[in-house]
Image (cartoon, helix red, strand yellow):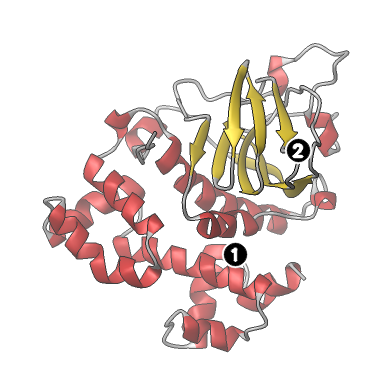
Amino acid sequence: MKIPVYRLKVDYLTRYSDFNPLLLFAQKYEFTPKEYCPLRVCYANAVILVEEGRGTLLLDGREHSLQPGSLVFIAAGLPHQWISDEKQLMVHRCAYFDWRYVHRPEFHYQRDYFKGADRPFLEERASFMSGLELHQVMKVNNIALWLSYFNAFTQPPSILGVRSPIESLQYNAAFQTFLHHYLTLAVRNDSWCDPRIAQLLEKIDNASLEQSESELYVWAKELGMGRSRFHQIFKQETGLTPHEYIQRRRLHQAADDLTETDLTVTEIAQKYNFSSIHYFSKAFSNTMGVSPSQYRQQRH
């Protein structure tokens, strides 16, 4: 089934004064073939991308088959269990977060966020977002793009609980960007979005950067929008101009190159058609919170 792309309107979010998403921890996890976790319940909310491999998710009494590109939302308090395929490694990218700040002075490690079998679930230790309906399991096609979002805020496990304010700002800024993209895809109520922008965002996210830039106004015209009206609606729905949206995609792909290739910062700036290394570094820092060199150093 094809999942439509939706965007939360700002006027909806402002009705929730406690909407203040906070990243708790993020990690990459590998399930070996036949591995499974016990049925568990988490105090945090989670968005999880299956990077590779296959398996099964038991979520709130339902069984879901998973494959590369499966994007899963698990709300705090929902029982769930992961089961890896009998023959394949299953690799996850996981982000655990709160919709608002929750005071948990006794939580010091990641394991503390998972309720023990011998303890009752304490709702005051979890954060919920009433009225927000999200698809629990979806499929995304551009796995590399979504991996770049996760890479920007995936940090060493040891950083949990001992982050400096600067580190918290850096990781949460990247997480907020990711969450924006995720919510445009995952929100279920179509009354919150202009369907033309929803269709166009899907085209952008599934196309190459070059195609997105060359075909953007062609796509808008096909959807019945003139250039100025298109800019107005796009900014209203996404909070960004079309150029800013595509630029953000370019910077996330550049971030992947910083961690996965030996290209110099200058070569990466040239690859993504930045006019100068100075302009590339400034744009990268504004989006990712650190310079390209610092980003590479932190992930090596």
231 sits to left or right of 121: left
Against 111, is 171 above or below? below
Residue appearing at x 55%, y 47% in the figure: 69
The percent coordinates of residue 283 (x first, y second) are 48, 73
Amino acid tagged 2: Glu
- Secondary structure of residue under mark 1: loop
Q: Quadrant of the C terminus?
A: bottom right
Disc 1 and disc 2 in contact, CB within 8 angstroms: no
Can residue 99 be seen at all in this image of the molecule? no
Numbered label attached to residue 289: 1
The percent coordinates of residue 259 (x first, y second) are 67, 71
Q: Splitting the image into 4 quarters, where does residue 124 fall?
A: top right
Against 61, is 28 above or below? below
Q: Splitting the image into 4 quarters, where does residue 214 fall?
A: bottom left
Residue appearing at x 76%, y 23% in the figure: 40
The percent coordinates of residue 5 (x first, y second) are 36, 41
Residue situated furthest front in the rendering: 87
Numbered label attached to residue 86: 2
The percent coordinates of residue 61 (x first, y second) are 63, 15
Against 149, is 49 above or below? above
Measure the C-alpha gap from mark 1 to mark 2. 41 Å
The answer to which of 230 and 185 lies nearer the viewer is: 185
| Closer mark to the observer between disc 1 and disc 2 | 2
116 sits to left or right of 5: right
Against 273, is 11 above or below? above
Residue appearing at x 24%, y 66% in the figure: 215
Amino acid tagged 1: Gly
